[in-house]
Image (cartoon, helix red, strand yellow):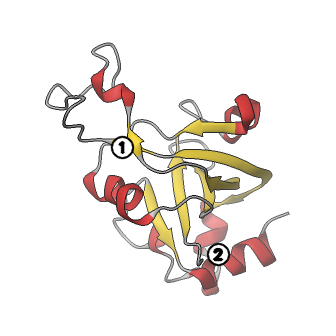
Amino acid sequence: MTHRYWLMKSEPEEASIDDLAAAAHQTLPWTGVRNYQARNFMRDGMKIGDGVLFYHSSCAVPGIAGLATVASTPYPDPTQFDPKSKYFDPKSTPENPRWLLVDVKLDRKTSLIPLTTLRETPELAQMQVLTRGNRLSITPVAPEHWRYITGRMLK
């Protein structure tokens, strides 16, 4: 079975690598995705065992903060049904959910690889997260980029 690789962005105040490390079984549901393309990556592309670059975004120093693994098949994101949640979607119903999530399990926290370092690395020039205008919270990672990051950049 061939695994795929993903970069998943999270704002540290929502869910940081430390939150993942402190969670029960070091596993968290990836709630709050409200972009159809990112949802489709979870629904159609992700499989249990796929590798994840856990990326801190919208913070002082964005970048890769650790490694994780997709730990579940996709299932409905419960925040879409909660009127008190900022991720509530009144058009979504339990019978016809719009939004899905997967569980993510910590492999290891790493030294942060800042976005600036990723941008300065010629071997990563074609990495989807680095393309101009990319705002997706989940992007596929090519095997060669995964190998370069995990083999040469992570400590």
Camera-near label (2 vs 1) is 1
Q: Is residue 145 above or below residue 10?
A: below
Residue at the location (58% across, 78% down)? Answer: 2
Location of the N terminus by quadrant is bottom right
Location of the C terminus by quadrant is bottom right
Q: Which residue is mark 2?
A: 146
Q: Is residue 119 left or right of residue 138?
A: right
Q: Closer to the camera, 29 or 117?
A: 29
Q: Is residue 151 left or right of residue 129?
A: right
Spatial separation of the CA atoms under disc 2 and disc 1: 25 Å
Quadrant in which residue 151 is drawn = bottom right
Q: Is residue 118 above or below residue 68?
A: below
Specify the amino acid type for callout 1: Leu
Residue at the location (59% across, 53% down)? Answer: 55
Q: Count the labels in the image.
A: 2
Residue at the location (54% across, 79% down)? Answer: 142
State the image coordinates of residue 94 (x, y, percent, origin top left): 25, 29
Residue at the location (70% across, 80% down)? Answer: 147
State the image coordinates of residue 116 (x, y, percent, origin top left): 62, 65
Q: Which residue is mark 1?
A: 100
Specify the amino acid type for callout 2: Trp
Residue at the far top in the pictured view: 84
